[in-house]
Image (tube, rainbow, N blue to C red):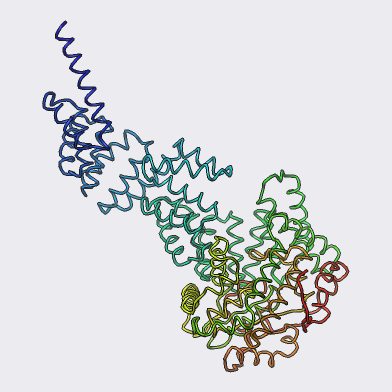
Amino acid sequence: MQSALNRSQSAAAQAAVLTAATAQLEADPAGALAAADALLAHAPDLLPAQLLAGQALRRLGHLEAAVTRLSALAQIAPGVPAVRWELAQAAAAAGMPETAIPALEQLTRQLPAVPGGWFLLAAQYRAAGRDRDGWQADLKGVNAAAQDAELVQAALAMQQGRLDEAAAALAARRARQGDDPPASRLAAEICWRQGDMALAIAQLEQTLAQAPGYDLAREFLIRLLVQASRLTDALAHAETLRTSPLESPGHDLILASVLVHLGDQTRARGLYQGLLARNPGQPQVWQNLGHVLKTLGEQAGAVTAYREAVTRQPTLGEAWWSLANLKTVKLRASDITAMQAALASLAGQDETGDRARAEDLFHLHFALGKAHEDLGEPAAAIAHYAEGNRRRRALIVHDADEFSAEIDAAITTFSAPFVASRGGGGCPAPDPIFIVGLPRSGSTLIEQILASHSQVEGTMELPDMMMIASRLAARIDAGEFADFSAMAASLSPADRTRLGEEYLTRTHIHRKSDKPRFIDKMPNNWQHVGLIRLILPNAAIIDARRHPMGCCFSAWKQHFARGQRFSYDLVEVGRYYRDYVRLMAHFDAAVPIAVHRVIYEEMVADTETQVRLLLAHAGLDFEPACLEFWRNDRAVRTASSEQVRQPIFTDGVDHWKAYAPWLGPLAETLGDVTTLYPAVPASLAPI
């Protein structure tokens, strides 16, 4: 009995020493190692002491010694997960994937629900040149992390809008156990929801550096890169995603979307057609194919694709609107009946928080408006347009007063003395030709005319100038400058040159030829004419202008896929037009030759004269091809894509007059801007 008591006391003493040594492992690994070796001197078979020695050696950086001792221990205790985990970490740190991989394969078989084992195994597979196996292991790690209670709670807080709470939980987790890919991806989404796009992208890039096979993180990164107009990077990631061992049609859809943003409609078409060949029952893909075919000028194919979409999903409002929005197509009575049935079907559904249903509804109303317009039924058309606009307006944020204040700030800043005082600076390249103005003002016609010139390449509505302007404005919001004028005045000649060069670099990906000039047809750039003059002083700026009533009515009855938040209310679109006219009038006075204005009605009435003036302003010689612009088969992405594939016609000039009885709020808002058109009121104040 005394012998048993002695053994019990000895075991208790060993346990106490182990507990104390383990507690000091992180802070004093050398002390922990000494304690472990002391125990092993008296009890060489004490497995916890052997494990502690291996752990301490790894933390001291004695990696080969750690691997040796832990490998021996793994032979003795193959069923202890902690031994395999320590051996794997030591071997990985020592650059010995051939040792780490078997340990991790056994560990993940024992504990498949522990994400860390899978992610380390993935890294070791890649270190051994087994990239495909590494990708698979990453995917299994992501799947295991879905059961992590801490991450689930943080994700729930994020979804409920408690972003600071979610971020704090992840920060505490990181401090406790370091970064792990699922937590890093979740942190990126929180940053994005908080409005920090740059940090979100950086966080996702870090996530993929840790786990290149994390497909969901790569999908999210592609989405943000597209939003940030980093299209080259987005394309590279989309190409990588498509090689995932987890085959998914969604990967082709993502790649096609990036290609559309890059203007590679032809390859996107091939991807959509491939997806439909494998599974034709995909209305959304049929709709996407229709968009691409429309852009490529393949109108018959676009009509077929849109009809396939609505046949498979009769309530798919965007497909109906896209079909109606083909300016050379008129919907049939049977189409109106089908859309009315779709409205009735949607009306019977619960609309609480259902964004997709809301979008189907307003698209259907816009499509029905166009159908009745084509039938010469203005009262019915107006009723549907009004309801579509009402529903769309409820889903967006636009503050007309705030926007007018921004225009006031631009007018105050870009005075004639200020512009004259800037002197040198800015990128001298004459490459860009900016076409600015309101949508539905004839800008696509001007673009097609210019793009028919041998020295000019048409691109699309490029977001890059707006993104540069937004970044500069963010410096004001961050408190770096008191106001817009202070920020603009702070830009040195070198700053302006750098910004101009940045614009050219950002837009280079859209230039597919060696033509020396290119078009940026983002209409909203009229707000940034002052910035354009500062950073690209030799760029040509064309102001496309159309009769105020015709232009605003046309914009109001046009649902835009993105970017035009002002157009869904007759008063607001009228205010926007007035703000546009007064800013451009200011630049006419401050920098008289900076902008060339093309009046749509004059272009229609005397095309050759207006084309010659347009080319002269852009520094281009006259070429007859510019008068036969409809023969140009380039891709056109805007709402006028079919109209510019035929000679100029005058049908649309006074079309708004048939709807004048319903346009009183617009006419009242525009006031003398309409009565004096194309002249501009001498004094034009915001409403």
Residue 302 to residue 533: above or below = above
Against 286, residue 122 (above or below) is above
User: In what quadrant of the picture does the N terminus appear?
Assistant: top left
Q: Is residue 88 left or right of residue 252?
A: left
Residue 112 in view (yes/no): yes
Residue 652 at x, y percent in the picture: 77, 78
Q: Residue at x 76, y 63 (%)?
A: 569
**In this view, which residue lies farthest toward the left?**
41
- Residue at position x 57%, y 88% from top? 453
Q: Is residue 281 above or below residue 652?
A: above
Is residue 269 something that shows in the picture?
no
Residue 478, quarter of picture: bottom right
Task: Give how far across and how far down residue 541 sits, in percent.
Answer: 61, 82
Q: Is residue 8 above or below residue 465?
A: above
Horizontally, residue 373 falls left or right of residue 313, namely right
Could you tell me how many numbered marks the image carries?
A: 0
Compared across the picture, whether 52 is left or right of 379 comes to left
Furthest residue to the right?
661
- Name the one closer to the observer, 428 or 389: 428
Work out whether residue 576 or residue 93 is closer to the camera in this orientation and state it.
576
Q: Position of residue 516 (x, y in %)?
A: 49, 85
On-image quarter of the C terminus: bottom right
- Identify the residue at image location x=65%, y=92%: 612
Residue 317: horizontal and vertical position, in percent? 69, 57
